[in-house]
């Protein structure tokens, strides 16, 4: 569906101006959008998982932990597939947040994936400049991620930053000069980003960020010793079909959460870079950008240079 067709449908959660902002700039922030009872449930479950991660010594099927992680000082970088880990996360993704997604995808919405990222006052928590769609190309670009801040987020604890209008600009090469997948811009490309066009999306707990999969974005390191969790849920319009294997599918991947599955795929003529073969497994963008072995979970490194 075109933005004009989507905007012709009544808004469910977002305001019309927020929807228009998203289509014009490639992102939008909405402060204190999540109802307080839903937010408190998400926070409680998240705190439980942080406690569980204290016993981990290596990254595995559930947790991606950072260098120096200990029981006394956990560095939990990611809870993988939270929609499969606890019904609270999935009820949120298929409930309130699916209505938000329908405001931007149109009436037919497909769930793609979920993850819970943390900032831990450590340089390894920087997420460098990148675009999402190269990780999972689709037939069109009606693909986006909704982030939910589970803690107050300001410039001290690493908010999401997005370059205005970059969703309509050419995509970057996210392989290095040796053909290895890095999942980020090269230093030379990153140096060309016009920082005057970058917005930092801050807000109290319960605020959401929404960015298109083509939008250029990053997240700086936190300067706060208090961890900042960001719950991320990715959705697509039903007419956006994947070209490549899913990097990290859950039991809910490609489930229709609003409307119905459609019979025809819509194709955007703009090209998209193809990622490595993800069928061997995937750990996290932190591992990709740090050059860590991302296969994990007793699987071989996929072809295409994922080291």
Image (cartoon, rainbow, N blue to C red):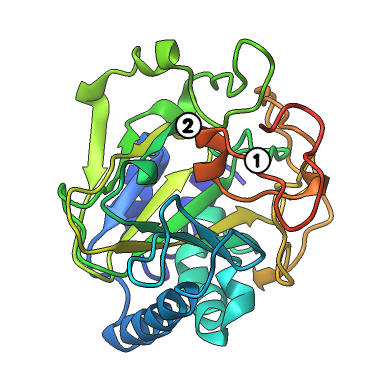
* In front: label 2 or label 1: 1
Question: Residue 91: x percent and y percent?
Answer: 54, 83
Give the mark, 2 or 1, whose residue is nearer the N terminus.
2
Give the residue at x 20% y 23%.
196
Question: Residue 201: x percent and y percent?
Answer: 25, 48
Q: Is residue 282 above or below residue 39?
A: above
Label 1 sits on residue:
293
Quadrant containing the C terminus is: top right
The quarter holding residue 22 reads: top left
Give the residue at x 62% y 53%.
236
Task: Tell me if residue 167 can be seen.
Answer: yes
Q: How many residues crowd mark 1 within 10 Å: few (<14), some (14–19), many (20+)?
A: some
174 horizontally vs 163: left or right: right
Question: Residue 248: x percent and y percent?
Answer: 69, 55
78 horizontally vs 72: left or right: right
Label 2 sits on residue:
130
Give the residue at x 44% y 50%.
67
């Amino acid at each position: 569906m075109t933005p004009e067709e989507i905007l012709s449908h009544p808004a469910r959660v977002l305001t019309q101006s927020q929807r228009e902002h998203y289509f014009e700039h490639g992102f939008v922030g909405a402060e204190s959008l999540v109802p307080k009872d839903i937010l408190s449930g998400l926070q409680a479950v998240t705190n439980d998982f942080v406690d569980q991660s204290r016993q981990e010594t290596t990254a595995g099927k559930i947790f991606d932990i950072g260098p120096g992680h200990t029981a006394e000082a956990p560095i939990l970088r990611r809870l993988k597939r939270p929609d499969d880990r606890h019904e609270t996360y999935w009820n949120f993704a298929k409930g309130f947040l699916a209505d938000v997604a329908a405001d931007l995808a149109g009436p037919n919405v497909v769930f793609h994936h979920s993850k819970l990222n943390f900032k831990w006052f450590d340089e390894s928590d920087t997420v460098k400049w990148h675009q999402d769609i190269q990780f999972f190309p689709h037939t069109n670009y009606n693909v986006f991620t909704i982030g939910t801040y589970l803690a107050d987020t300001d410039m001290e604890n690493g908010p999401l930053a997005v370059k205005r209008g970059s969703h309509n600009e050419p995509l970057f090469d996210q392989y290095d000069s040796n053909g290895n997948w890095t999942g980020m811009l090269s230093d030379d490309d990153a140096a060309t980003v016009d920082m005057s066009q970058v917005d930092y999306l801050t807000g109290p707990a319960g605020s959401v960020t929404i960015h298109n999969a083509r939008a250029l974005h990053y997240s700086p390191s936190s300067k706060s010793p208090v961890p900042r969790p960001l719950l991320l849920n990715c959705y697509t319009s039903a007419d956006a079909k994947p070209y490549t294997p899913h990097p990290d599918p859950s039991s809910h991947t490609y489930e229709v959460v609003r409307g119905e599955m459609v019979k025809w795929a819509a194709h955007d003529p703009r090209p998209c870079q193809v990622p490595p073969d993800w069928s061997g497994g995937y750990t996290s963008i932190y591992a990709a950008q740090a050059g860590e072995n991302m296969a994990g979970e007793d699987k071989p490194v996929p072809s295409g240079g994922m080291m």
